[in-house]
Image (cartoon, rainbow, N blue to C red):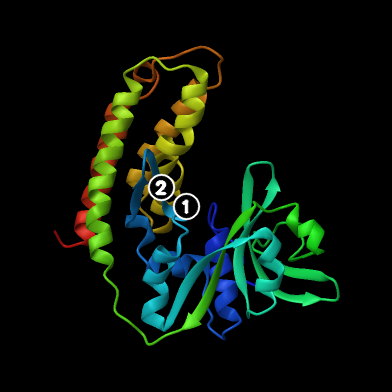
Amino acid sequence: MKYMTFNSSCSFAGLANMLSLYDVDTDDKTIARKMRLPFLFSKIEDSYIAGPMLQEAKWFNLFLKPIGFQMSEKEVEVEQLCSYLSNIKCAMLGIYIKPMIKHAVIYTRKLNDKYCFLNNKWENSDEEETIMMTEEELFERLDLTTTVATLSRVEPEVVDIKSSMKNSISVLNSLQNDINTFCNITRNPEELRVAMNFLFRPILLDGITMLELINQDEICNKLKYVQKELLGAIKGTESILLSKKLSLPILNNAIDDYVNLIKKNLNL
């Protein structure tokens, strides 16, 4: 069993668990480092994504293709899911563990009338390592359509990670600009709540996690300082001007340092 070793790494631990079924020994941190995850940022419409939230096959294939595997994703309607699972070796999918909160699990087999899933968890967690559900219990934890990820063996292939890293510089610069714009307008609690995920999380949570993964303590500590300010600022129920609550010069300096770190790893 491969466990989570960094924040929100359930899909990365899940990939390690899938690979173990193919006799490949790895873990979530190794996968993240090999695919250069700390240097990758993405933007989808108005939302920024970084670190462990980069969970699509195209990102995992940066790690998989060089070692002779490929991840494929298929959208499966819930009524067809169990039939689909019965024909594959293993699969990763997200199930709801709380309202609006999904968790990646690995389907491994059917035992009698129950479907067995590896629970990608922290080693010291008291959660069960295997989740067993009947078809009805499984359906209750799924969307009407579920993304199912599977692995296949392929010829090893060199991948272009550098282009994704170069694009991440532009994304990070855009994120910096959008954060400054957001912070210079008075925002109500609902605007702040929404921005926590699509604007602040990529740099002040997932960014911190990624910097810790590569021992970049100086940048990390700057971001943690601003993170603490942000969490304190949003506790109230009033509209606030974040530029008066956050040390934006420290945040901007940290983001500039992060951009330079990516450039350094690109040898630019």
Viewer-proximal residue among 179 and 85: 85
Task: Tell me the tag on residue 49.
Answer: 2
Q: Residue at x 36, y 85 (%)?
A: 156
Q: Is residue 225 above or below residue 107?
A: above
Contact flag, marks 1 and 2 (Cβ < 8 Å): yes
Could you tell me which quadrant the N terminus lies in? bottom right
Q: Residue furthest top?
A: 238
**Image quadrant of residue 124?**
bottom right
Task: Tell me the tag on residue 53.
Answer: 1
**Image quadrant of residue 118?**
bottom right
Q: Residue at x 47, y 13 (%)?
A: 239
Q: Position of residue 20 (x, y in %)?
A: 58, 80
Q: Is residue 87 above or below residue 27?
A: below
Viewer-proximal residue among 145 and 53: 145
**In the displayed structure image, the side of residue 135 where residue 151 appears, left or right:** left
Mark 2 Cα-neighbour bin, 10 Å: few <14, some 14–19, many ≥20: many
Q: Position of residue 258 (x, y in %)?
A: 28, 47
Q: Position of residue 160 (x, y in %)?
A: 26, 70
**In the displayed structure image, the side of residue 259 where residue 212 appears, left or right:** right
Which element carries disc 1, helix, strand or loop?
A: helix
Q: Residue at x 48, y 21 (%)?
A: 233
Q: Residue furthest left?
A: 268
Q: Position of residue 11 (x, y in %)?
A: 55, 61
Q: Amino acid at mark 2?
A: Ile
**In the displayed structure image, the side of residue 186 where residue 146 appears, left or right:** right
Viewer-proximal residue among 160 and 85: 85
